[in-house]
Amino acid sequence: LLWSAQGVTDPAGLRTAPSAGALYPLELHLVVGEVTELPAGVYRYQVDSHQLARVATGDRRTTLSGAAFGQSWIARAAAVLVISAVYDRTTVKYGRRGPLYVHLEAGHVAQNVALQAVALDLGMTPVGAFDDQRVKSVVEMADREGPLYLLPLGRT
Ligand SMILES: Cc1cc2nc3c(=O)[nH]c(=O)nc-3n(C[C@H](O)[C@H](O)[C@H](O)COP(=O)(O)O)c2cc1C
């Protein structure tokens, strides 16, 4: 699922989803609740090595559900993929058009994950209704990043 979102497909570092100018402004965190062989916690996807780095331990799904205005089903997803952006990576080249490109890219990534989820017989619903600061706090996101999308995943 993470590879479909931002996996590297080419020795030059190109990825599974298109990116304006190949500047790759998006970052991925995974809030894990019930995943085989992956303890509950928050992880950050490391694109180059295709590995997860643990950011925090413990099940934070209920807190994340609270950050999404109490959408209770988010707390029952096995895991939630959080897409965030570092806008500067794109605006440094594209200026005022940069934020548009970043948002379009998040849509590409979400669609890749949706398709991969279906291929794995899993469900995914994209979530845009949440409080930015609270989501940042739940996943311990860097200040320079802003959350764009939550992708709860699980068996249907
Ligand atoms: C940008 C965006 C934000 C969304 N935010 C939410 C959300 O916060 N909560 C939710 O339950 N669904 C959310 N959805 C999913 C839509 O409600 C859903 O796609 C729509 O009802 C059509 O259903 P379908 O995708 O199952 O065909 C969002 C979809 C998009 C594209």
Image (cartoon, grey):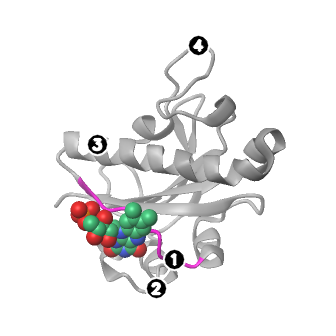
Looking at the image, tell me whether mark 2 or mark 1 is earlier in sequence order: 2
| Distance between mark 2 and mark 4 Cα atoms | 42 Å
- The quarter of the picture showing ligand 1: bottom left
In this figure, which residue is indicated by the disc labeled 4?
Answer: 11
| Distance between mark 2 and mark 3 Cα atoms | 26 Å
Looking at the image, tell me whether mark 3 or mark 1 is earlier in sequence order: 3
- Is residue 32 in sight in this rendering? no
Q: Is residue 140 above or below residue 67?
A: above
Looking at the image, tell me whether mark 2 or mark 4 is earlier in sequence order: 4
Few, some or many residues within 10 Å of mark 2 (<14, 14–19, 20+): few
Q: Position of residue 65 (x, y in %)?
A: 43, 78
Q: Is residue 144 above or below residue 133?
A: above
Looking at the image, tell me whether mark 2 or mark 3 is earlier in sequence order: 2
In this figure, which residue is indicated by the disc labeled 2?
Answer: 69
The answer to whether mark 2 and mark 1 are in CB contact below 8 A is yes
Residue 2 falls inside the magenta stretch: no
**Numbered tag placed on residue 130 in the rendering:** 1
Few, some or many residues within 10 Å of mark 4 (<14, 14–19, 20+): few
